[in-house]
């Protein structure tokens, strides 16, 4: 069977403001019924010992600031996971680093 459907090719562009990217040293992933949310954050100050006034328990407070929030539909999570795995494998081969 011959497929006469033309292939899709994304023509990606990026604005100068977005091209530089944002530094993040922390990420949080969570979901809602409609999709997945990736919050990228930067730690803003050194961690400090703090006290929870309601329980009296001590905890380590790590102040962070969200620098980017990305929302994706559930169908894209699988593609994102595959792309991350491919890039991690390539990185490991190129650098010899495995974690």
Image: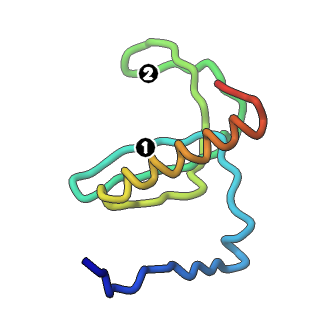
Q: In the rendered view, does 7 fall on the left or right side of 47?
A: left
Colour scheme? rainbow
Mark number, residue 29? 1
The picture places residue 80, in percent across and down from the top left corner, at 45, 53
The tag earlier along the polypeptide, 2 or 1, is: 1
Q: Which residue occupies the foreground of this view, 93 or 16?
A: 93
Q: Which residue occupies the foreground of this view, 36 or 83?
A: 83
Residue at the disc numbered 2: 53
Gap in angstroms between the C-alphas marked 2 and 1: 28 Å
The answer to whether 38 is drawn above or below residue 46 in the figure is below
Which residue is found at the position 58% from the left and 78% from the top? 12
Which SS class for mark 1?
Answer: strand
Q: Nearer the viewer, mark 2 or mark 1?
A: 1
The picture places residue 14, in percent across and down from the top left corner, at 64, 77
Mark number, residue 44? none
Which residue is found at the position 56% from the left and 51% from the top? 66
The picture places residue 65, in percent across and down from the top left corner, at 60, 48
Query: Looking at the image, which residue sits at the far front?
Result: 1
- Image quadrant in which you'd find residue 72: bottom left
Q: In the rendered view, does 72 fall on the left or right side of 39?
A: left
- Image quadrant in which you'd find residue 90: top right
């Amino acid at each position: 069977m011959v497929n006469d459907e033309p292939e899709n090719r994304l023509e990606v562009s990026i604005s100068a403001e977005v091209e530089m990217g944002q530094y993040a040293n922390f990420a949080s992933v969570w979901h809602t019924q409609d999709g997945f949310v990736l919050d990228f954050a930067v730690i803003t100050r050194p961690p400090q010992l703090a006290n929870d006034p309601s329980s009296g328990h001590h905890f380590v407070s790590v102040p962070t600031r969200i620098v980017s929030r990305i929302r994706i539909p559930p169908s894209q999570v699988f593609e994102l996971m595959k792309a991350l795995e491919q890039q991690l494998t390539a990185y490991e081969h190129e650098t010899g680093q495995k974690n």
